[in-house]
Structure formats: structure tokens, C-alpha cells
Image (cartoon, helix red, strand yellow):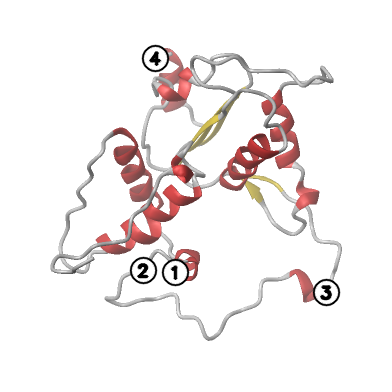
């Protein structure tokens, strides 16, 4: 596995996708031996069919594995015409698909996304008019000056540019039960924790299972709850 990690690290291919639909494949992600870690300019998507101690199952039809079924369903661009399916949205779809549609199969998929989302499939919307385009929100300012971005859908939608740092924080909090974020006043600590870290934990797109974590209300020194 160390050799595989070195292969990924030294590869000139900067968008790397590793999907394993086989028994006990979660060991690849659980022990992280295959993940070289943060690497500037590199994006990686690891998906494993089952936990390290679990078997991976084939559909009763015998056509292919349960994970492969979820991936094929998620990669179909016709389910979201006019939108790119990337590694983050795919993992979110597969996670829900296996929990709801294929819940009779006793396996839990694992995934790990590092770096920027990798675009996978796309199909143009059927309409050639402006109907399918995102409406320009002229009354929304994405800049907060010295005000922090918050843990709200509106702020998360326009929060941008802290993917690498958010990945680093996710890796730390996933491994340890305490995380301190330090920096000068106004450097964006609150924003990256709220609109970056907490948002990704809630969505569970980058680390398996974080969508089930309980996120408590934010407490400031001196406040009474």
C-alpha cells in the first residue's frame, strides 16, 4: 500500500479517482495508507464498497456490485441536466442511494475526497432558452468585509477559496476529538470553521459518516446558554 501511495504522490496526473468495489476495501480509506495527504494542485476521490471488516455484495440480478450500481446511477447526467456531476455530488448521491434504495444489502460504503471537486459527467439541458441558467442575484453581495461567513445555506453558497484549509481541518477533526484554529484577528478563522468545516461535516460529502455527527450551537465566551 505504501508503494501505491507513492505512485499517487509522484504521478503527473493531478486528478485521481480510486474506486474499489470489493470485499474489505474500506481498509484502504480507514487506515489511509493509500492517501498521500494534502498535495498542492492535486485532487483525489477514494470510494470503497464496504468497511474494512465487511463483505461487498453483488446485486441479486448478478449484473454487478452494489457500489457499482450506485456509481452508475449517480454518474448518469440525465438525472440533473445542465449540471456537472462531480466527485462531491456523486459521493453524496451514492451515500443516500445505498442507504435508501439498496438498504437491504448489509454493507457501508466509505469515501474520502481531497482537494477540489473533480468534474465527471454533464449533459446539456433540453431547453435552449435561458430557462435553465442560474438567475443572477444582483441583490446578494458575496463579500462580508470583516464580518464572518456563517453556517447558513446562503453564506455557504458564496463561501469560496478555502478548500485546502477546509480539507486540512476535516482531516484533523476526523482523527482527533479536539481542534484549535489559531490566527490573527480578521484572518478568516470563524468563516472557515463555520461555512467551511461545519458545512462539510454536515453534508458528509468529503468524509464518510460525518453527516451523522451532532453539531452543537456555537458558543462565544461570556454567553449564557
Residue 59 shows in this picture: yes
Q: Nearer the viewer, mark 3 or mark 2?
A: 2
CB atoms at circles 2 and 1 under 8 Å apart? yes
- Which is nearer the N-term, disc 3 or disc 2? 3
CB atoms at circles 1 and 3 under 8 Å apart? no
Would you say 207 lies left or right of 96 here? Answer: left
Query: In this figure, which residue is indicated by the disc labeled 2?
Result: 149
CB atoms at circles 2 and 4 under 8 Å apart? no
Query: In this figure, which residue is indicated by the disc labeled 4?
Result: 2
Q: How far is disc 4 from disc 3 in space, using C-alphas?
A: 52 Å
Query: Disc 2 on helix, strand or loop?
Result: loop
Residue 115 shows in this picture: no
Q: Nearer the viewer, residue 7 or 125?
A: 125
- Which is nearer the N-term, disc 4 or disc 3? 4
Mark 2 crowd level (few <14, some 14–19, many ≥20, 10 Å Cα): many
Q: How far is disc 2 from disc 1 in space, using C-alphas?
A: 6 Å
**Mark on residue 155?**
1
**Mark on residue 73?**
none
**In which image quadrant can residue 70 be found?**
top right
Q: How far is disc 2 from disc 4 in space, using C-alphas?
A: 39 Å
Amino acid at each position: 500500500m505504501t508503494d501505491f501511495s507513492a505512485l499517487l504522490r509522484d504521478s503527473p496526473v493531478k486528478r485521481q479517482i480510486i474506486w474499489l468495489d470489493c470485499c474489505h476495501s474500506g481498509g484502504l480509506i480507514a487506515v489511509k495508507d493509500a492517501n498521500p495527504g494534502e498535495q498542492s494542485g492535486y485532487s483525489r476521490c477514494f470510494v470503497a464498497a464496504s468497511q474494512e471488516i465487511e463483505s461487498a455484495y453483488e446485486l441479486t440480478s448478478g449484473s454487478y456490485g452494489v457500489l457499482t450500481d450506485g456509481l452508475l446511477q449517480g454518474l448518469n447526467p440525465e438525472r440533473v441536466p445542465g449540471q456537472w456531476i462531480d466527485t462531491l455530488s456523486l459521493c453524496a448521491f451514492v451515500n443516500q442511494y445505498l442507504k435508501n434504495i439498496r438498504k437491504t444489502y448489509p454493507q457501508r460504503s466509505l469515501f474520502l475526497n481531497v482537494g477540489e471537486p473533480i468534474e465527471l459527467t454533464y449533459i446539456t439541458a433540453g431547453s435552449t432558452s435561458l430557462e435553465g441558467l442560474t438567475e443572477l442575484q444582483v441583490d446578494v453581495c458575496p463579500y462580508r468585509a470583516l464580518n464572518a461567513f456563517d453556517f447558513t445555506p446562503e453564506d455557504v453558497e458564496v463561501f469560496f477559496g478555502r478548500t485546502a484549509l477546509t480539507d486540512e481541518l476535516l482531516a484533523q477533526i476526523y482523527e482527533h476529538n479536539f481542534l484549535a484554529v489559531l490566527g490573527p484577528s480578521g484572518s478568516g478563522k470563524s468563516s472557515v470553521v463555520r461555512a467551511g468545516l461545519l458545512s462539510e461535516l454536515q453534508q458528509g460529502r468529503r468524509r464518510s459518516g460525518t453527516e451523522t455527527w451532532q453539531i452543537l450551537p456555537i458558543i462565544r465566551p461570556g454567553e449564557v446558554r
